[in-house]
Image (cartoon, grey):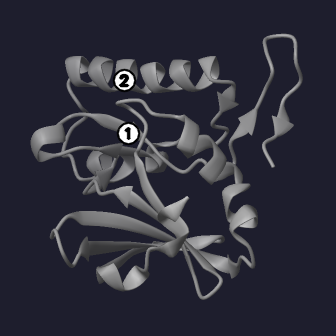
Amino acid sequence: NGTSRRRMDRYKVVKQLGDGTYGEVLKASNRQTGEVVAIKRMKRKYYSWDECMSLREVKSLRKLRHPNIIKLKEVIRENDYLHLIFEFMEKNMYECMKDRPKPFPEQTVRNYSYQVFQGLAFMHKQGFFHRDMKPDNMLIGTGAQANTVYLIDFGLSNTFDGPDALLRTAC
């Protein structure tokens, strides 16, 4: 896979969006195309490409292509740090809710709920469970993707082999 050969210098970091236990999320732009992306830079070091590709977040997102699941655009390992490049969305569901003077209209709630369930149903059919569903892990699109909900943060996801199987960790 040629993704390991790509370099982070193709991206210009605009600002830090968040900092968590396992990594930080950065807003960046592609220096060639101008496309705005979100970069999740993992805090721990990864000493091999196989180690990166066996992470549950990477394994699940490489398999899960759906309109309501965030798109993992590329994976870059540089100087033993892992960078996950995602399509960028401006706000998560929590930020949208707290910025409103009153609750979402019922039709909006129905629309968002339907999209979340569509994404989850697709994941389950593919043998994955998210395990960390909360408003912070749902992004709301703007512009061309206005009112589209995207599920994010698959770091705690698990796999299962079928309805009678026990859940097991993906790595």
Residue 84 sits above or below residue 160 on the image: below
- The percent position of residue 10, horizontal first and vertical second, equals 31, 80
Q: Residue at x 23, y 65 (%)?
A: 36
For label 2, the residue is 115
Residue 94 image offset from top left, x and y in percent: 38, 49
| Residue holding disc 1 | 150
Crowdedness of circle 2 by 10 Å Cα count: few (<14), some, many (20+)? many
Corner quadrant of residue 18 = bottom left
| Residue 6 at x, y percent in the picture | 44, 74
Residue found at the very far left of the displayed protein: 143
Q: Is residue 118 visible?
A: yes
- Of residues 106 and 152, the one nearer the viewer is 152
Pointer 1 or 2: first along the chain: 2
For the residue marked with disc 1, what is the amino acid? Tyr
- Please state if 76 lies on the left or on the right of 36 as rendered: right
Q: Is residue 122 above or below residue 16?
A: above
| Helix, strand or loop under label 1 | strand
